[in-house]
Amino acid sequence: MKKIIVLSIVLSFIFVFSALSADAAVRVRGYFKPSTGSFVMPHYRSNPDSSRFNNWSTKGNYNLFTGKKGYASPVKSFKW
């Protein structure tokens, strides 16, 4: 019985921490664009992955830092 309780607690922690990492933000340092010579200010973006459905600019989502709602369709430019 103790093993089942310990296992369920461990699995709960794994689930919670994996869910928290899905919304993680990555800081992007400022940089110069060589093509235009303009400077891009430092900013945050969503954690990079292969999904188009969890980006801040996708409809149904919002940017945690600016509060702006997503506008892009995740299916429109989806490549099969």
Image (cartoon, rainbow, N blue to C red):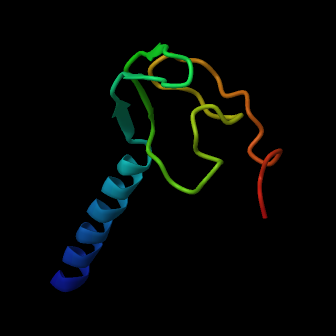
Foreground of the two, 38 or 52: 38
Q: Is residue 71 above or below residue 51?
A: above
Residue 67 image position (x, y, % from top left):
53, 17
Foreground of the two, 78 or 16: 78
Asked if residue 6 lies left or right of residue 52, the reply is left
Asked if residue 74 lies left or right of residue 7, the reply is right
Asked if residue 77 lies left or right of residue 55, the reply is right
Q: Is residue 29 above or below residue 68?
A: below
Q: Would you identify the image quadrant in which residue 74 lies? A: top right
Foreground of the two, 49 or 37: 37
Residue 10 image position (x, y, % from top left):
24, 69
Asked if residue 19 lies left or right of residue 36, the reply is left
Q: Which quarter of the image is occupied by the N terminus?
A: bottom left
Foreground of the two, 19 or 9: 19
**Looking at the image, which residue is at 57% across and 33% down?**
56
Residue furthest left as drawn: 2
Q: Is residue 18 above or below residue 41?
A: below
**Looking at the image, which residue is at 37% across and 20% down?**
42
Residue 53 image position (x, y, % from top left):
65, 47
Q: Is residue 6 above or below residue 34?
A: below
**Looking at the image, which residue is at 48% across and 23% down?**
33
Q: Which quarter of the image is occupied by the C terminus?
A: bottom right
**Looking at the image, which residue is at 25% across and 82% down?**
4
Q: How many marks?
A: 0
